[in-house]
């Protein structure tokens, strides 16, 4: 049954910086979503790598309800129990010594970039202010983070932009070796470029970044906003690489669907942020922190993470079978449950058409740029949902090649 709330209200009342699907999801459970008409979708998008435990997870729901009955918001003039517990857990489970909480990925990166500049200013001098980032990277939509991100289309209309930001080719050790200097205060990198095409970093590249940052007293920032919280089969992707950053940013899956972000840092860096240096009204909110504690408790289990790796193989194998049949993709790549399928040249620019057809067939999927189909499903997606999702994907691929 159609709701009285209409999709065209989006066009009438909302700033048109999105182009949402024609249907309105109204209900979701696990990896299934239903729209206003009662049509069912399998969710291979996970709310853009956010719903790590699927929709309406019972344990997250119970945690949220129990926190709702205690305290919702108090502000950072006070601390609160859930946020203290979450900070302790993130420190105990990672390289970091200290945590700053915020509400989104962009804010976590904003904090990371600001603390890196301030660290260099306090410990060295004002000339050490260059930030190196990589082409095609994505770090958020604040002015600083769009400028640092390596996709000029997101920053070019907002000049004047923050200065002393350099973009180098990703996975190119020679390029950074040639460029990095004593003026560099930080290098920021996604262990897998997410939005920009699902491109995993070469382990040797990350290792070289670590060595070069150490040689030039620059901080290494890993943006794990998309790759964190079990997404690659590890709590954080850096664990697999053998390279530890100085700063790590996390958001998306951390709240399992409840907005929260965090910046994790080493002690000597944390110290440069004193009361007044940086802040937020909502960051560290007890509701978000309570849910995030439960997310980490459920995700950071060997069996759970092993399940992500198993599903990775199943997804890749099924993608590859379909590709043998329909010859649509030139490459299948990614780690854990962050997967990308690059469209063959003859379908260039058509990733969005493919996800639109998939939605008509009852499958929600993502793109990563105009040429890459991306999957970032719930990390606990069930077998039946995988089976049904791939059968709907096959229907979509069949139509895609015909159309
Ligand atoms: C790697 C990465 N960094 C930062 C962001 C920005 O996060 P948010 O949209 O929560 O601000 C994203 C979002 O897609 C991301 O994938």
Image (cartoon, rainbow, N blue to C red):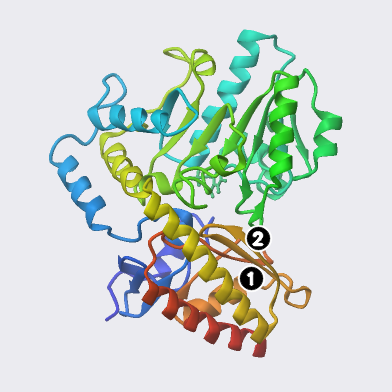
Asked if one can make out residue 42 in the rendered structure from this viewpoint, the answer is yes
Residue 61 percent across, percent down from the top left:
22, 53
If you read the primary sequence from the N terminus, does the residue marked by circle 2 or circle 1 appear first? 1
From the viewer's perspective, tell me whether residue 293 is left or right of residue 311: left
- Please tell me which residue is depicted at 66% across the width and 57% down the height of the picture: 197
How crowded pointer 1 is (Cα within 10 Å; few <14, some 14-19, many 20+) is rated as: many
Residue labelled with disc 2 = 369
From the viewer's perspective, tell me whether residue 171 is left or right of residue 24: right
CB-based contact (under 8 Å), mark 2 and mark 1: yes
Tell me the quarter of the image containing the C terminus. bottom right
Query: Please, what secondary structure does the residue beneath circle 1 have?
Result: helix
Residue labelled with disc 1 = 351
- Which residue occupies the foreground of this view, 291 or 208? 208
- Which residue occupies the foreground of this view, 287 or 334? 334
How crowded pointer 2 is (Cα within 10 Å; few <14, some 14-19, many 20+) is rated as: some
- Please tell me which residue is depicted at 74% across the width and 45% down the height of the picture: 135
Q: 350 above or below 231?
A: below
Q: Quadrant of residue 247?
A: top right
């Amino acid at each position: 049954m159609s709701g009285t709330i209409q999709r065209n209200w989006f066009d009438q009342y909302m700033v048109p910086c999105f182009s949402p699907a024609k249907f309105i999801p109204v209900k979701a459970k696990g990896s299934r979503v239903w729209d206003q008409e009662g049509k069912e979708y399998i969710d291979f998008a996970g709310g853009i790598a956010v719903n790590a435990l699927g929709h309406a997870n019972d344990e997250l729901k119970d945690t949220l309800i129990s926190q709702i009955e205690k305290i919702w918001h108090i502000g950072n003039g006070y601390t609160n129990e859930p946020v203290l517990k979450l900070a302790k857990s993130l420190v105990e489970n990672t390289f970091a010594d200290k945590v700053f909480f915020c509400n989104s990925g962009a804010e976590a990166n904003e904090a990371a970039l600001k603390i890196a500049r301030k660290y260099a200013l306090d410990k060295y001098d004002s000339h050490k202010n260059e930030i190196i980032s990589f082409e095609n990277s994505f770090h958020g939509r604040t002015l600083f983070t769009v400028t640092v991100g390596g996709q000029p289309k997101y920053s070019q209309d907002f000049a004047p932009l923050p200065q002393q930001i350099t973009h180098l080719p990703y996975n190119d050790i020679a390029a950074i070796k040639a460029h990095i200097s004593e003026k560099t205060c930080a290098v920021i990198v996604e262990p897998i470029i997410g939005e920009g095409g699902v491109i995993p970093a070469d382990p040797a590249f990350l290792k070289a970044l670590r060595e070069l940052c150490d040689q030039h007293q620059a901080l290494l920032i890993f943006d794990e906003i998309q790759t964190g919280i079990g997404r690659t089969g590890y709590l954080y992707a850096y664990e697999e690489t053998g390279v530890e950053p100085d700063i790590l940013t996390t958001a998306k899956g951390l709240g399992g669907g409840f907005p929260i972000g965090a910046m994790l840092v080493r002690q000597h860096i944390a110290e440069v942020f004193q009361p007044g240096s940086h802040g937020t009204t909502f960051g560290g909110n007890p509701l978000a922190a309570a849910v995030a504690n439960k997310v980490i408790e459920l995700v950071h289990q060997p069996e759970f993470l092993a399940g992500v790796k198993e599903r990775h193989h199943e997804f890749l194998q099924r993608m590859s079978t379909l590709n043998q049949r329909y010859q649509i993709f030139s490459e299948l790549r990614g780690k854990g449950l962050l997967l990308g399928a690059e469209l063959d040249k003859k379908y260039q620019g058509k990733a969005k058409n493919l996800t639109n057809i998939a939605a008509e067939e009852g499958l929600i999927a993502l793109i990563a740029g105009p040429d890459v189909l991306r999957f970032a499903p719930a990390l606990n997606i069930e077998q039946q949902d995988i089976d049904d999702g791939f059968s709907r994907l096959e229907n979509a691929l069949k139509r895609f090649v015909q159309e």
